[in-house]
Image: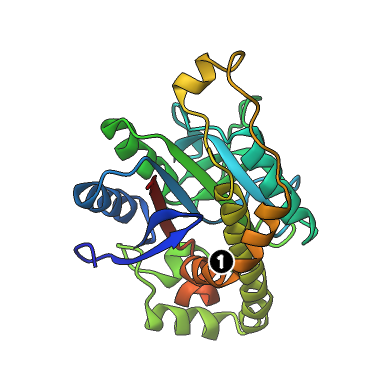
Amino acid sequence: MLGPFRCYRFRLFDRNCLLVKSGIGLKRAMDATYALLAATSPQFLVSFGVAGAVNDDLRIGDVIVASNTCLLDKGIPSQFQRLAPLSDAARHAATQALQQRGARFVSGTAITTRGSQVVQLQPKEMAHPVLEMETAGVARVAAEQGISLMALRAVSDGPQAPLPFSIEAVTDEELNPRIGKIIKTILRHPQIVLQFRWLGRNVEKAAENAAIALVAALSQPLPVVSPSHRRDRGRRRAQPSVGCRGADQLRRDRRVLCHLRRRVDGSHRTFALALHSHFHFKEI
């Protein structure tokens, strides 16, 4: 445990890894990141989980790597904060892994909201936006500490498969699910029981795709491009492509992949609440 946050230590691709389960919401995400950085000094941070698509250009199970993130205030996005880009090799590995499942891996924008909101203004540079509740908070802490952050979000709902309820309808002020509020919601709208079933399937698919994309990206020697590498891009050697060794390693790490998927999905899948996790590693 890191304070109130559950954590899991393991090795993946010859790296020491720490997975921290923060729970739902901006404050929890920031508190968990502070706790993580107080306990260790990671090379970089990865934030991953599920999210809702804003537009119909994303399908259930697609995964976005966020180029930037912002807070949503009364439907209006705030200032964008850029996030660490993936290396070409890591992007290629994640794309190939998801193609086998009929899903896409694309660049997008993580829009962090404190509750149920509708995006009323979409700047042209906001490609493939998704709504979630944590990334901007993690990004703020990472920026304070000077650590690169990569963010992955898999689509669990959207215009073609909307949430049948609002977050506020089933949680309290601190975003904790409340059985009483859930029962009241079901009694008022009995048809929601059937909608929960397909919603649970969508979240499970999204959670697994998020874990698959993450493990595939981390199979590469340098998953993210640091500022120094961006400056030396013309001089540095090309990143290695995904070969047989990477594919074999990915199959050997199915147990870790399933572990990651469970951490993203967890006990919240019934209510499709975005369970947010941080994944960091350092080379050993």
Which residue is more in the foreground, 279 or 49? 279
**Whether residue 32 can be seen here:** yes
Residue at image x 28%, y 54%?
32
Helix, strand or loop status at disc 1: helix
Instruction: Locate residue 201, reporting x and y percent.
Output: 66, 74
Image-based side of 265 in relation to 92, left or right: left
Instruction: Locate residue 43, reporting x and y percent.
Output: 36, 40
Instruction: Locate residue 55, reporting x and y percent.
Output: 70, 45
**Whether residue 159 can be seen here:** no
In this rendering, is residue 68 above or below 207?
above
Residue type marked 1: Leu
Q: Which residue is mark 1?
A: 257
In this rendering, is residue 153 above or below 129?
below
Residue at image x 44%, y 26%?
79
Quadrant position of residue 203? bottom right
In this rendering, is residue 269 above or below 138?
below
